[in-house]
Amino acid sequence: PQTGRTDSPYVARRRDPAWLDQAMVRSVRSDLVALAAQFALRPTRLLQAGPGRATVQVRDDAGRLFVLKTAAAPGALARDVDANRTLRVAGLPVPEIVDHRDGPPSVLLLRWIEGDPISSASPVRTLREVGRLLRAVHTLPGAPPFSGQPTIGAWIAAWTAEVAAWWPSVGAGDAQVRRLRDWLDELEPVLAEREGRLTLFDGRAEHFLVRDVRVAGLIDLHDVGPGDPAMDLAVIGLTDDRLIPEVLHGYHAEHAQDGNLRSLIPFYLLLRRLAGAEWQLRNGSTSEGTRLLRLALRQVAKVP
């Protein structure tokens, strides 16, 4: 399904501090090495790669680390730049832009942010800080369209229809698909009242980097755009929903509560798990796709 935007344009690679071994050297194409050399930098690690795109960790002669993002199409990284600047003005801890070229190829050079992804093992104060940061994002306006649809309700209905049509191809039964559709019908009055705000959309746990129990950075901003704030609160728990309660606590601190969040978050979580499974399986990441599919099946089995 495409209505909800892809969960990620890349296939994630492991993050570790080691210098490139020979296998990793071979995985960095010569054109990426040449591109890094234009900035007097050398690749240290291939972080992500996909059709027409790549993200590489690079360093200078002084040992300082940077992230070099590149895309074949001209202007392909303009959304990343716009999102970075918008969130920086709002006080979010985003990477510093060192250079940007529209290309072709499009190039974005960012300062490296050292940190570890949040997890359910992170301190409570850290998870609540994530909630406060999401609240700051959601104070910014996000006008329609929403993935081509005029309202939040129309967007979610179209996306759910695509997911429901795909799900049986990987073994879902009629009862499971019917429960998904019925759940959407139950939420229709709530969805009709939702107003758009700026959202991360792909603000998964691994995109919040923590250092010394504080959120040091928010990365991978390509999908920032108008949407439903409840979606961000669901996505944070995509692979581990134990993160959601404390993040939600921080989100609500000193602010009026959105009474519909608790009804929407579980549905959005199921929708994103199914959409993520479809994307991963279609793009060859069988293990991650299967993992998300299993999480979705366990979740839908608990739905009354």
Image: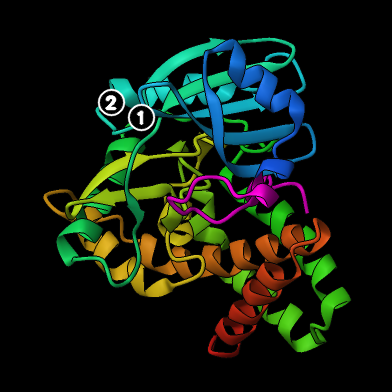
Q: Residue 149 location in percent, x, y? A: 68, 38
Residue 286, located in which quarter of the rendered image? bottom right
As for residue 12 lying within the magenta part, the answer is yes
Q: Quadrant of the N terminus?
A: bottom right
Contact (CB < 8 A) between labels 2 and 1? Answer: yes
Find disc 2 in the rendering and name its residue. Answer: 90
First in sequence, mark 2 or 1: give its number: 2
Q: Is residue 154 visible?
A: no
Question: Does the segment drawn in magenta span residue 202?
Answer: no
Count of marks placed on residues: 2
Amino acid carrying mark 2 in the image: Ala
Local crowd size for mark 1, using a 10 Å CA cut-off: few (<14), some (14–19), many (≥20): some
Q: Residue at x 57, y 45 (%)?
A: 20
Q: CA distance from mark 2 to mark 1?
A: 8 Å
Q: Nearer the viewer, residue 235 or 218?
A: 218
Q: Residue at x 60, y 53 (%)?
A: 13
Secondary structure, mark 2, is: loop
The residue nearer to you, when weighing 82 against 37, is 37
Q: Which residues are magenta?
A: 1-24
Can you say whether 195 is above or below 270 in the image? above
Residue located at (78% from left, 32% from top): 52
**Residue 263 place in picture, x, y as percent:** 43, 68
Q: Is residue 137 visible?
A: yes
Q: Indicate the position of residue 107 as horizontal and vertical percent values.
A: 61, 18
Residue displayed at 66% across by 68% down: 288
**Which residue bears the numbered disc 1?**
140
